[in-house]
Amino acid sequence: MPRVIIALFAGLLLVTGCTSVDPARYRGEKPALDLYRYFDGTVDAWGYFADRSGAVVKRFTVEIRGRVTNGALVLDEAFRYSDGTTSRRVWTITRSADGRYRGTAADVVGEARGVVSGNALRWTYVLALEVDGTTWNLDVEDWMYLQDERVMLNKSVMRKFGFQVGEVVLAFRRRS
């Protein structure tokens, strides 16, 4: 009997640990976020990755060069990490009239999906992340909050099998 109770409790934790805030909660928040407008041009970002205990593992900066081409937003992200390494990710993002977005990148498994409501974006995807020679497919829930025309804040939570393995915190600043 105790095993059944433990299994039910573990299952409940998994289900409740994966629930998220409904983006519609931010519908009335201003300024309204338009990803195409915000990222069209150059945006700088500063952030860190923290492990599941909250310890900062790596700090980084990002220069994002965005452009709208053939109805899609292309984001070319150049990362510089505190240990001297660099990486690059290129997103191609499309939007529909209902405020939903879809995106692809080389290290994203399948397609990212997002929805904007008010000043917020909820973006979910599976990230193929190389760790010590092994590729981990991590479920990412990304929240971005536009503060004003130039500043946006971002928090990403990464999970494997429903358990949080880390988070990324970023501050974006759009160049004038």
Image: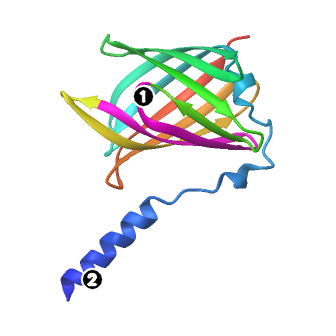
Instruction: Give the vertical position of 132 relative to 139 (above or below).
Output: above
Q: Secondary structure at mark 2?
A: helix
Looking at the rendered structure, the secondary structure element under dot 1 is: strand
Which quadrant of the view contains residue 30?
top right
Residue under label 2, please give it. Answer: 5
Q: Position of residue 119 (x, y in %)?
A: 73, 40
The stretch in magenta equals: 106-129
Q: Which mark is residue 48?
A: 1
Amino acid, disc 2: Ile
Q: Earlier in the sequence, mark 1 or mark 2?
A: 2
In the rendered view, tell whether residue 19 sits above or below residue 27: below
- Of all residues, the one furthest to the bottom in this rendering is 1
Q: Residues within 10 Å of mark 2 (few under 14, many from 20)?
A: few
Residue 130 lies in quadrant: top left
Q: Please state the horizontal and vertical placement of residue 4, each as a whole percent of the image.
A: 24, 83
Q: Residue at x 39, y 32 (%)?
A: 49
Q: Position of residue 174 (x, y in %)?
A: 67, 17
| Image quadrant where one finds the N terminus | bottom left
Tell me which residue sits at (42%, 66%) in the image: 15
Q: Is 122 contained in the magenta span?
A: yes
**Front disc: 1 or 2:** 2
Badge 1 density bin: few <14, some 14–19, many ≥20, Cα 10 Å = some
Question: Toward the viewer: 113 or 145?
Answer: 113
